[in-house]
Amino acid sequence: MASMSISEASTTVVNMNPDAVEKLIGLVGSTVGKELPKPSDLTSFVALMTEHTDALIAGSSDSDAEGCFQILFFDLQEEREPEVARKLVSEISDALNGSEEKAALRLRILANLYNALVADEGV
């Protein structure tokens, strides 16, 4: 599987390329040192990202880690069930709050999550 930069992944996801998530997961997998499965839905995408949050933050540049979460947040904005969205936001927040390593980066990512969801009154 070909790897891509975060900026390419972000552009690709925004353009709704069906291979974008798979390529992003390849990038995350290379950061954590193992091949990761392509998530089948948003819930599995969040589970995969939260499982590897600490390794992603520790093992990649701040901009790459932040970009990965921005792509996740883009997909999260598409969730139309408020209960599901609240549960996923909680899981993401818990993963980001699970360590103090690179605390400023974790706070920026949490702020990005807030900004992505602030207009959605259901979450």
Image: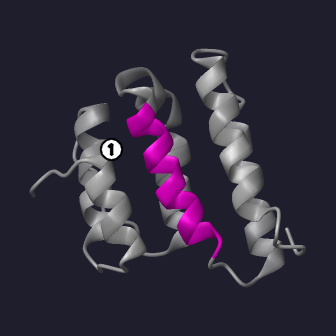
Q: Image check: 24 left or right of 3? A: right
Residue 113's place in the image compared with 123, above or below, is above
Q: Where is residue 10 in the image (x, y as percent from the top left)?
A: 38, 60
Residue at 66% over, 78% down = 79
Q: Position of residue 94 (x, y in %)?
A: 73, 39
Q: Position of residue 118 (x, y in %)?
A: 82, 62
Residue 88 visible, this orientation: no
Query: In this figure, which residue is indicated by the disc labeled 1?
Result: 28
Residue at 22% over, 47% down = 35
Residue at 47% over, 52% down = 48
Q: Which of 36 and 6 is in front in this view?
A: 6
Residue 78's place in the image compared with 94, above or below, is below
Is 116 included in the stretch rendered in magenta? no
The stretch of residues the image draws in magenta is 63-77
Q: Which of 98 and 109 is in front in this view?
A: 109
Q: What residue type is labelled 1?
A: Val
Q: Image check: 34 left or right of 51? A: left
Look at the image and tell me in which quarter the N terminus lies: bottom left
User: How many callouts does the rendering have?
Assistant: 1
Residue 1's place in the image compared with 50, above or below, is below
Q: Image check: 112 left or right of 10? A: right
Residue 76 visible, this orientation: yes
* Other residues around mark 1 within 10 Å, as few (<14) / some (14–19) / many (≥20): many
